[in-house]
Amino acid sequence: MSSLRLQPVSSETTTDDAAEPVSADDLRFEKNIEEILGLVGEDTSREGLLETPRRVRKAWREWTEGYAMEPNRVLKSFVDGASDRDEMVLVRDIPVYSHCEHHLAPFFGVAHVCYIPTGRIVGLSKLPRLVDIFSRRLQVQERLTQQIAQALDDCLSPQGVGVIVQCRHLCMESRGIRSRKAETTTAAYRGLLKTDLSMRAEFMERTR
């Protein structure tokens, strides 16, 4: 069976639903959603569900648009001689909204991202955009954390990188063990943040 991937679209683009082009893959997706609704016991002909397959398809386009985004296009750096010193650039409490690849259930929380420049910096808004790129893919939190750190390290070649992600997982809260409000914390370090324990401690203190 061939794999199906929706073509992601930007969440910043709005379209007239009536005029929206619908591909064969879009129709397959909607048909599959309708079938799932029936399999869980719903009446797919009732008024409240008539538009649900279309809405779900459009939502998943947005939730998975990270597959069409490249970190190196976002992390365009520029030279700033004043930044060539051992000082952290930190953006904390960046919202994270993603879906786990095991159950397609949401997980959400915040990310704290820092790097120590070597003369090359990026606009501060690029760090939340980087988090968003990897969040809008099917994920596990551990890999998400590593991907953010590695992309920063690859694109900026900084002296150090630190990433901490703190999330709640609905696959753990609403099913199975049903552990209410349990928070998972993952971390990734590169360069000085990995080798210099005092610098890592400073980063962790700033994220509290």
Image: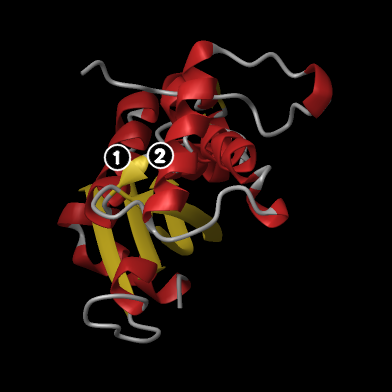
Q: Amino acid at mark 1?
A: Gln
Give the image location of residue 189, x and y in percent.
Answer: 24, 52
Quadrant placement of the N terminus: top left
Per the model, the C-alpha gap separating discs 1 and 2 is: 7 Å
Report the amino acid beneath label 2.
Phe
Q: Position of residue 37 (x, y in %)?
A: 46, 51
- In this rendering, would 107 be left or right of 61? left
In this image, 187 relative to 86: left or right? Answer: left
* Residue in the foreground of this view, choosing between 117 and 161: 161
For the point 39% across and 59% down, the residue is 40
Name the side, left or right, on which 95 lies relative to 118: right
Callout 2: SS: helix
Badge 2: few (under 14), some or many (20 or more) residues near its Cα, within 10 Å?
many
Residue picked out by circle 1: 147
Q: Nearer the viewer, mark 1 or mark 2?
A: 2
Q: What residue is drawn where x is 75% and y is 26%? A: 13
Total number of numbered discs in the rendering: 2
Quadrant of residue 149 within the rendered picture? top left
Q: Which residue is mark 2?
A: 134
Per the image, label 1 sits on a secondary structure element best described as helix
Mark found first going from the N terminus, 1 or 2: 2
Vertical side of 127 occupied by 119: above or below: above
Residue drawn at the location 29% of the way across and 83% of the way down: 178
Q: Is residue 27 visible?
A: yes
Q: Residue at x 48, y 63 (%)?
A: 110
Q: Which label belongs to residue 29?
A: none
Labels 1 & 2 near each other (Cβ < 8 A): yes
- Tag 1: Cα neighbours inside 10 Å, few (<14), some, or many (≥20)? many
Q: Position of residue 117 (x, y in %)?
A: 43, 38
Does residue 114 appear in the picture of this structure? no
Figure quadrant of residue 21: top right
